Image: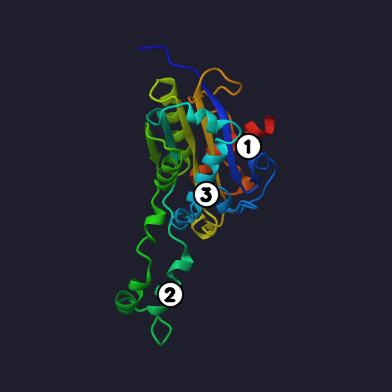
Amino acid sequence: MPEPRPVCIAGIGLLCPAGIGEEGARDGRPGVVPGFRPAAFIADRKQLKLMSRAVQLGVAAARLALAGGGEELLAAVPPHRRGIFVGASPQVGEAEDLRAALQAGTGPDGAFDLRLFAEEGSRLIHPLWLVKGLSNNVLGFASAIHDLQGVNASWCDAEAGGWTALREGAFAIAEGRADLVLAGASDCLVGAELLLGGRPAGEGAAFFLLLPGEGELPFHPDPAPDLDPEESSLGVLGAATWPVVLARTLLAGA
């Protein structure tokens, strides 16, 4: 077997409750990403309508990872040698999208009527509502936007998914299966506090541009670095946990 190639981080895209980019490396609290405007990162308005909040965050983080020279690096690599690895969770569509259907399925006495919902309410649900929640949407949209035609995978494995995406992305570079990889994760658990036993929740995404070579930020995917995966100051971040922790650590030390 050929000797594994060294892997380095050439770009970092971070969005978390502490902020966007370098701002996200500061202290923060649970909740939403402050000042996040999806349209500032995603030009196609039709695509925006098909994205859940977590997908918007993930696609934005991937774009941020390519900022500051990454686009030029991307252009120098053939599409079939560009890979992407993503950690994500299934996301339900926006609750507001179901309001009209639920109202139509509510009887005169104020009680929900399943038969009425099936006959009158279901037709009011947009056919793409469920599609917005597919866990591989970050991979799909980012691949289309940046023409990533090479090796790829998406992991729906809670907190483990984010670190798995980073490891497998780095292995793809080290083993010569790709010459450029975007790897990271995205999740949004805001509003899921009851399901988390009352633990405060947050949202976030972090992606890394990985390249072969020594670089200023070498990346060693195995074993996991000595970081705190809890990030209690930002709340529960789901699949985004490990990439966000790593991004915050690297940007804080820059």
Q: Mark 1 points at which residue?
A: 248
**Horizontal and vertical percent for residue 138?**
44, 45
Label number found at residue 124: none
Circle 2: residue type:
Ala
Q: What element carries label 3?
A: loop
Q: Pick the quarter of the image with the N terminus.
A: top left
Q: Toward the viewer: 65 or 39?
A: 39
* Image position of 14 with respect to 172: above or below: below
Q: Image point 48% across, 43% down: which residue?
A: 239
Q: Mark 2 points at which residue?
A: 100
Dot 3 or dot 1, earlier in sequence: 3
Circle 1: residue type:
Arg
**Horizontal and vertical percent for residue 202?**
57, 51
Q: Which of marks 2 and 3 is in front?
A: 3
Q: Image point 44% across, 30% down: which residue?
A: 169
**Horizontal and vertical percent for residue 51?**
46, 54
Q: Name the residue under label 3.
A: 42
Q: How many marks?
A: 3
Q: What element carries label 2?
A: helix
Q: Nearer the viewer, mark 3 or mark 1?
A: 3
Can I make out residue 218 in this image?
yes
Residue 147 image-quadrant placement: top left
Q: Badge 2: few (under 14), some or many (20 or more) residues near its Cα, within 10 Å?
A: some
Q: Badge 1: few (under 14), some or many (20 or more) residues near its Cα, within 10 Å?
A: many
Dot 2 or dot 1, earlier in sequence: 2
Q: Image point 48% across, 52% down: which residue?
A: 44
